[in-house]
Image (cartoon, rainbow, N blue to C red):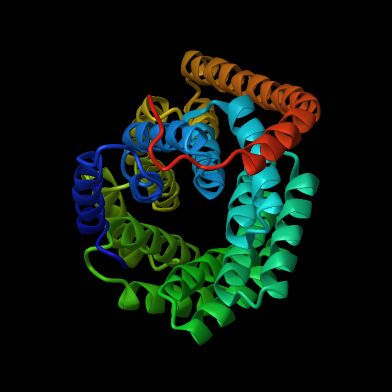
Amino acid sequence: MLNSDANITQLEELIAELRLQKAPSTQLIDALNELAQALSAVDIQRALEASKEAHALAYLLRHHMGLAASLARLSWLHLEAGAFDKAVIEAHQAQFMAEQLHDYVLTTRAIYVLAVAQRIAGNYAKAETHWRHLLSLAQSNNDAARQANFLNSLGCLFEDQRDFARALDHYRQAHGIFVQLNDTWHILAKNNMAYVMTRRGQHDEAQELAQQALHLCDPGWQVWRALFLHTLGVVHMHMEEYDSARSELGESLSLSLSPAGRKTTAVEALIDIARLELSNKRVPAAYDALEQAVNLAAEIKALPLEAQAHKMLVRLHANARDQDGADRHHDAYLTIQNKIELKRIERHVGLMRAEAKVAQLRPVWLQESRQLAHVPLDPYPTF
């Protein structure tokens, strides 16, 4: 994996040098776009600032490629930040511009955002259509790396729908390509296959793959290690190897709660720790794990996981004949389920609203692209 901190520092130093020039340049725009991409995984706000600046400068300098690149990045960042309508409109504009420029990479980035937007809105058929389109583009361009990534995304899509057979098939195809390319993502693909296999009852095969993933994982990759430990803990729980499961789930939780960890994995680990404790008749420990899961899920706004933890607590309180406790958690569960449904409807409406806006904007984009194409570029514009 790349040293992202070093890459960000180098880009910031380059941008500082380019700012010293007497006028903005296309090199500055390209560097800002690269910085936004590098920052996307670590600091969304700074990434947005860099991307917005790149977009404004690209428009002023009529740098078509820089403009399309900034739109593709902005669309992803706005989707991450929850600005759903804006993200979808920007992704469509980025796709329009990328296709005008015949730029394959930017086209895939824009369609990728649209695919993810459809997935999180629950429009699985439309999301699959986008992923199939992306897969076809990658195959046509002999781009094995993106082909593997898109196969992996299709696997995630089918896993969301609990279609574990199709998920496993696509994860296997992705894994095969990653191995051929000697791409480190083959390690994550092994874990994906392991998790789906254990959901299908193929625990021995799942254990072998999860152990391989953990063995190959760099100790510094805490997010990945926590995922792999979680998968291995779930596998061992199904195999009734409870001591191993407890150790692995506990380590996954610890890594996920660290500053470099991913709190969503921590919630998932807590829920499975509760299941493990119930398998061992340790009911108080299960209560404790689920209460922690509820609080952490609420903190990070992971509504489906929060609902899942409340649902388990309803059963525990009901089994203990604590009707007040069961009612309290049932009410919380229903409230969260209503929020999830309202969010789903809001995203559906947002998609329809965005698609209608895009239909209105396409003629404008076409006119703008023609104007930009016919206006000579001034290397020293006046601001």
Which one is nearer the viewer's eye here, 7 or 144?
7
Write the residue at 45% across / 31% down.
56
* Outermost bottom residue: 180
Residue 221, image x, y percentages: 28, 62
Residue 273, image x, y percentages: 38, 48
Image label count: 0
The correct choice, above or below, for 248 with respect to 89 in the image is below
Where residue 97 sits, quadrant-wise, is top right
The correct choice, above or below, for 382 with respect to 276 in the image is above
Where residue 291 sits, quadrant-wise, is top left
Write the residue at 34% across / 49% down.
31
State left or right for residue 202 relative to residue 276.
right
The correct choice, above or below, for 205 with respect to 73 in the image is below
Q: Is residue 121 visible?
A: no
State left or right for residue 49 relative to residue 83.
left
Which one is nearer the viewer's eye here, 332 or 286?
332
Which one is nearer the viewer's eye here, 136 or 94?
94
Q: Is residue 365 visible?
A: yes
Residue 88, image x, y percentages: 65, 34
The correct choice, above or below, for 149 with respect to 173 in the image is above
Q: Quadrant of the C terminus?
A: top left
Q: Quadrant of the N terminus?
A: bottom left
Which one is nearer the viewer's eye here, 346 or 78?
78
Residue 198, image x, y percentages: 56, 66
Write the residue at 47% across / 77% down.
209
State left or right for residue 293 relative to residue 84.
left
